[in-house]
Amino acid sequence: MDIDQLAAYLHRDARAVSKLASRGYLPGKKVGGEWRFSSTEINHWIETQMHAFTEEELTALERPRTATCVAGDVLVSSMLSENTCAVPLRATTKASVLKELALLAEQSWQVYDGEVLHEAIKRREEMGSTALASGVAIPHPHRPLSERAQGESIIVFARTGRGIPFGAPDGGLTDLFFLVSCRDAITHLRVLARLSRMMLRPGFFDELREAETPADAVQVIERAERELVE
């Protein structure tokens, strides 16, 4: 992408994007005196910066472009079910959490090779933890899985009985986990933006921690998302 294409992709002014690139805040390089940006690198940059985005910036990322596996205005809830929720998740280490999340994902019947997904989220965590300072983590593959490994986009939610070390930036423990595995990069970013907006909702984390069953957790998530889109 060039500057104008990236500005449209980020829903930002081209001059502002140019300044960010010149100051080294955006991953890019100059070719023949013109900025060029890799979509993969930009998507990874968005993932790492999204926690600091404003509500307006997150909403802009949700605007439909060319994406698949999206059901109307509901993103997260359409990809989640009680079968892909675990409350509590019986795992006590980061490694066991990732393994159990991949096993849960297979219950969606959209993941055909759980081991491929497991290896993909492990490699993504090696690039940098997906844990946030609020006790939540969003493991996901760095790139969409192949059609042989996955069908439709899916989300898994799990809550461990107690917090575990997962690499949060503040050194805190993590007990809430959203595994996100989408079929294309744009849908992936839209889902991350929607989740981030839901996490800004007062009491959202408390309600998830108070949920006693997978059905309760699904209801909390569905209600929080409906309040954003209705």
Image (cartoon, helix red, strand yellow):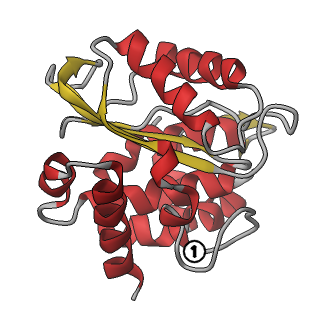
Which is nearer the eye, 49 or 88? 88
Amino acid type, mark 1? Arg
Which is nearer the eye, 32 or 113? 113
Residue 91 vertical placement versus 52 (above, below): above
Instruction: Give the crowd class for mark 1: few <14, some 14-19, many >=20 residues within 10 Å.
Output: few
Total labels drawn: 1
Residue 155 vertical placement versus 147 (above, below): below
Residue occupying image coordinates x 57% and y 57%: 79
Relative to 67, is 125 on the left or the right? left
Coordinates of residue 118 in the picture (x, y in percent): 60, 20
Secondary structure beneath label 1: loop
Coordinates of residue 173 in the picture (x, y in percent): 17, 23
Instruction: Classify residue 193 by image quadrant.
Output: bottom left
Which image quarter holds the C terminus?
bottom left
Instruction: Classify residue 63 by image quadrant.
Output: bottom right
Which is nearer the eye, 91 or 10? 91
Q: Residue furthest bottom?
A: 230
Residue occupying image coordinates x 38% and y 78%: 226
Coordinates of residue 99 in the picture (x, y in percent): 50, 17
Residue labelled with disc 1? 63
